[in-house]
Image: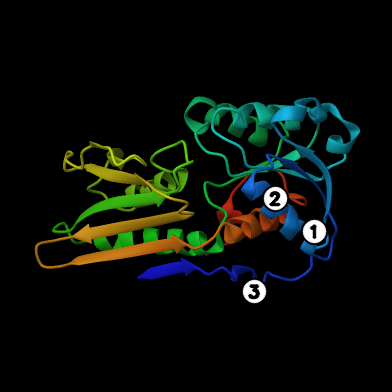
Amino acid sequence: MHVSNDKNETDFKYNKPNEIEMKIALIGYGKMGKMIEQIALQRGHEIVSIIDINNQEDFASDAFKSADVAIEFTNPMVAYDNYMKAFAAGVKVVSGSTGWLEEHGDEVRNLCTEGGKTLFWSSNFSLGVAVFSAVNKYLAKLMNRFDEYDVSMSETHHIHKLDAPSGTAITLAEGILENLDRKERWVPGTLLAADGTLSGTTECAADELPVSSIREGEVPGIHSIRYDSEADSITITHDAKSRRGFALGAVLAAEYTATHEGMLGMSDLFNF
């Protein structure tokens, strides 16, 4: 099975002007931030604040505080601090930044479930990935009966991506672990770096799921899951062709977050 995010992904039924105009703050103004801005404006929303590296003081501005939702796409090193600053300003957050969960996950969840804060977090906002994730879990349930198949995963991203494996790959791996009894944990597999250097190994214990990574060019994201036996193999792949699907998903998540509270995710937005 191959699921592909077409460059015209915004043509699906969610691509219509939103009935309620929101005030949106952007945290991070790289390629993704600029695309989110474009789609938010197309859907009738207002961008009231843009915060990047050089104007961190604007977290305390009246403009930022007026936002209904802040959409945050930065990097693993600063995401948690951005959440805390937005929460302090009384602003809900939608974020696709990864890498902060291990150290701060419990604290952030508690702030959202007990402390009155709101974070919509996903490792990937693409509608195609949401569908792919549901297929991944269902396939793992089916394959739970067939011990002769071993499972592995690979992900490919652009050379600028700092974390490996990707947050999306980890989320997909966790979906497999929830439904495949013979696997207890995921482990990093091989890493093919942008300079061609190969490190790591896919050799692992029988109860481990190896997740390999490739960093090349400007690839938005490819995730493949393979079940392999002596008789045959089954592979499912999601191949993102542009960042536009991710950006649209983030704006849809913001529209949902504006009227909901707590710790939210793609399973709330799309109930497959």
User: Residue 44 at x, y = what percent?
Assistant: 83, 62
Q: Does residue 109 appear left or right of residue 206 in this picture?
A: right
Q: Which residue shows up at 83% across the image and 27% down it?
A: 60
User: Residue 189 at x, y = what percent?
Assistant: 26, 41
User: Residue 186 at x, y = what percent?
Assistant: 31, 41
Q: Which residue shows up at 68% across the image and 30% down it?
A: 82
Q: Amino acid at mark 2?
A: Lys
Question: Mark 3 vs mark 1: which is more N-terminal?
Answer: 3
User: Residue 92 at x, y = what percent?
Assistant: 74, 40
| Cβ atoms under marks 3 and 1 closer than 8 Å | no
Q: Amino acid at mark 1?
A: Leu
Q: Which residue shows up at 18% across the image and 60% down it?
A: 228
Q: CA distance from mark 1 to mark 2?
A: 11 Å
Category of crowding for the residue at label 1, using alpha-carbon neighbours closer than 10 angstroms: few (below 14), some (14–19), many (at least 20): some
Q: Does residue 161 appear left or right of residue 252 in this picture?
A: left
Instruction: From the image, tell me which residue sits under label 2.
Output: 34
Instruction: From the image, tell me which residue sits under label 3.
Output: 11
Q: Amino acid at mark 3?
A: Asp
